[in-house]
Image (tube, rainbow, N blue to C red):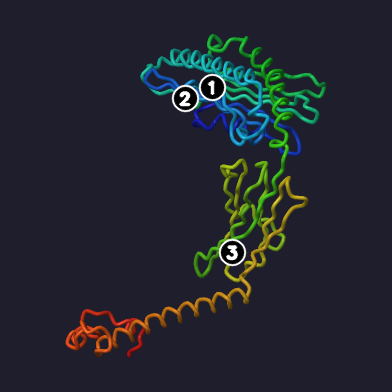
Amino acid sequence: MGPRGLLLLLSGALALTETWAGPHTLRHYGTLTSRLGKSQYVNVGYVDDTEVLRFDSDLPHARAQPGLPWKEQPWVQQEDPHFWEEQTQLFKLCEQHSGARLNNLRAYYNQSEDGSHTFQIVSACVVGSGGRFLRAYGQYAYDGTEIFTLNLELSPRTKANTTAQITVLRNLLHQENVEGWSDYLQHRCISRLRQFLEKGKETLLRADPPKTHITHHPISDQEVTLRCWALGFYPADISLTWQREGEDLTQDMELVETRPAGDGTFQKWAAVAVPPGEEQRYTCHVQHQGLPEPLTLRWEPPSQTTINIMGIVGIAAALGLLGAVAAGAVMWRRKCSGRGRKSYSQAACKSGCWGGDIWDPWESVGWSL
C-alpha cells in the first residue's frame, strides 16, 4: 500500500467505530517523530469519542495525563496514583519500541539520521454488550506508509481468528510481534476499556441531543443556501440529510465532517442550494442517539410581526438621530446670530457656518434650513 500521508492510520482505525447504541472502542494513536537526531513521542487514547489519556515526551517530567473533559471528573482526581504511574511506564515502553522500529526501518531503507521521519502505531479493541470481545486492530506505518497490519475478528464459533499482513522483511517485525499484539489487544486492551467504561460511565454513557436550527444565506438572485446546524451533541455519530418534498438530496448537499466543539461535545452542518421562494419545499432530517425520535426541520422566514417591529425600531432610531442633528443646527445658528456666546462673531458665521469649512448636516440628508 502506497503512502497516504500521516492520516492513513486514523482512517483505518476509525473504520472500527460503530454506532453508539452498539459496541464501545478503546483506541490509541502513537506517533514518534525524529528530526535531526531528536525525537518526540505522543500517544493519545480515546474511548469512543472521548479523549481519556495523553502522553507527550517533550513535556517536563513527561507523564500520562487524563484528557479533557476527564480532568474534572471526581473519579479521575481520586484515582489511585499507581494507575497513572502504570500508564506512564506503558507509554515510555511504547516510546522505546517505536524508536527501535524507526531506527530499523531507516536502516532498511538506507536513510540518513539527519532527515525527518515518523513511526506510527494505532491500536483499537472493541467490546459488545456485556463487555464481550468483538474485534481488535493493530497497525504500523513508517513515513505514512502502512507496513504492518493485524486484524482480530471474533468468528461464529466464538474463537478469535487472527490474520496478519507483513509488507516488509520479517527480520524487522518478528513473529513475536504478532503474538504480542494478539495478547495485548484481546486481554490488556479489553480489560482497560472495561475499566474506563465502568469508572467513567457518567461521561461515556451519556447522550447529549443536538441543538438544531436552519440559517438562510442569499447567494444571488437565482440561488439561496439553506444550512442545517447541529450543535452541542455527544456522541459524535449523527445523521444530517436534506430532502426536497421527500426526495433525498444526499448527492446534492454540502456536508462537513463532524467537528469537536472543544467542550467534549461535537458540531456539524449540512447545506443545500435552493431557488429563492422555494425554501419551504426543503426539509432537514436529524438523527442522533440523544433524540427520542428523528427531527424534521424546515426554514421559517421571519414573521411579519417581527419585520414590522424591526421597521418601527429602525424608523424611531432614524428620527431620533435627525432630531439630535436638528437641535445641534439650531444651537449653532443661535450662536451665530449673537444669542450664544459672545466669542462667536457674525463675520465668522457668515464665512463658515453653512457655506465654508463647516459641515451642513441638513445638506447631507437633502434638507435645508
Mark 3: amino acid: Val
Eyeballing the image, is 184 above or below 319?
A: above
Determine which residue is flagged by label 1: 63
- Image spot of residue 127 (x, y percent): 74, 28
What x and y, as percent, mark residue 63?
54, 22
Position of 208 compared to 110: left or right?
Answer: right
First along the sequence among labels 1 and 3: 1
Nearer to me, 314 or 79:
79
Check disc 3 and report the residue beneath it: 274
What label sits on residue 190 in the rendered view? none
Question: Nearer the viewer's eye, disc 1 or disc 3?
Answer: 1
* In-image side of 284 versus 326 (left or right): right
Kindly report the distance in space between the C-alpha atoms of the residues bearing marks 3 and 2: 51 Å
Q: Decide: marks 2, 1 in contact (CB < 8 A)? A: yes
Identify the residue at horizontal 71%, vertical 28% (top origin): 126
Q: Secondary structure at mark 1?
A: loop
The residue at 35%/86% (across/down) is: 366
**Where, by quadrant of the figure, is residue 153 drawn?**
top right
Q: Secondary structure at mark 3?
A: strand
Q: Residues within 10 Å of mark 3 (few under 14, many from 20)?
A: some
- Front-lying residue, 78 or 45: 78
Please, what is the three-letter code of the amino acid marked with disc 2?
Leu
Q: Residue at x 73, y 45 (%)?
A: 289
| Snapshot quadrant of residue 81 | top right
Q: Nearer the N terminus, badge 3 or badge 2?
A: 2
Q: What residue sits right under mark 2 in the picture? A: 59
Mark nearer the viewer, 3 or 2: 2
Could you tell me which quadrant the C terminus lies in? bottom left
Q: Nearer the viewer, residue 188 or 71?
A: 71
